[in-house]
Amino acid sequence: MYKYEGQLVHQSHDDEGVIEIIDHDGVRALHFGSEARQSTMLLDDPNQLHSLYARAMMALLLFHDNPKDILMIGLGGGTVTKFLLHQFAECNIKVIEYRRGVLKIARSHFGLPLDPRLKVKIGCGAEYVNQQSKIKSAQHDLIMIDAFDHSGMAPEVGNEIFFDHCRTLLSDTGLLVINLWGTDKNLFQTVAWNMGRVFDWRILFLPVRRRGNIIGFAFGENKPKPSMKELQLKAKQLEQQYQLEFPVFVQDFKRNNNKVLNRVFRQ
């Protein structure tokens, strides 16, 4: 078993395996029995986003700066959920988390609040979107997917049927954001193809610098198209507001999405 650097402050087991929390150099990390860190939190600034992939997911604010009705698939330590609740007073969040033990840890060790704007359901995210897509369309203006276990991305949230159900649940001006694992090139290409087909190639990918994660973004059919200049100006404003590296995100969007830029940006 991987020997963690730092202090083991919690260890528990459920049907899916081990849940461990390590504190090291002022950072708390959630592990599922492997070296990979599922969530991280600064102990002296728990409301700020620490992990690079979570910060990159917030590039969504360049396109959708006031989310109101959010569906999240996967909770982890709840750091992204907590950030959204802290920053957006009018938002309501529904989280689907597969493991009840993970929810308990998010509450007890990562400060996920009991908040009337937050509802957490224990269950399979893919099954949930399938069921909800048959009940009512356009329920959410933001869908965020971060569903990983100890070995990688959950396969249920990368197929074409899943993205089709998400598109049904998304408003026509909404945004879908997904955390992908880019080092498995075949899996990444398959998921990217499925996203592109379902969302008519209104997609962008943001590689997370110094990490294997790639964040995918898919846009509703009537999402307004910004110009690149408008996005650069907005990035500077957002950087000052949230202390996140939005200008870097814009650079990396431009560098890594040549084939689909005209689907998302106004020329």
Image (tube, rainbow, N blue to C red):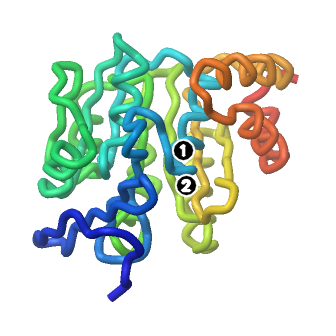
- Residue 255 vs 84, above or below: the answer is below
- Which residue type carries mark 2? Asn
Which quadrant does the N terminus fall into? bottom left
User: In terms of secondary structure, where does tag 1 sit?
Assistant: helix
Closer-to-camera residue (2/97): 2
Residue 201 location in percent, x, y? Answer: 67, 42
For residue 80, above or below residue 216:
above
Query: Mark 2 packing: few (<14 Cα in 10 Å), some, or many (20+)?
Result: many
- What residue sits right under mark 1 in the picture? 198
Badges 1 and 2: C-beta atoms under 8 Å apart? yes
Residue 222 in the image, given as x and y percentages of width and height: 60, 19
> Is residue 163 placed above or below 86 in the rendered structure?
below
State left or right for residue 109 relative to residue 216. left
- Is label 2 in a helix, a strand or a loop? helix
Q: Quadrant of the C terminus?
A: top right
> How far apart are the alpha carbons under marks 1 and 2?
6 Å
Of residues 237 and 194, the one nearer the viewer is 237
- The quarter of the picture where residue 184 lies is bottom right
Residue 210 - label? none
Residue 221 visible to the viewer: no
According to the image, label 2 marks what residue?
Answer: 194
At label 1, counting other C-alpha atoms closer than 10 Å, the crowd grade (few under 14, some 14-19, many 20 or more) is some
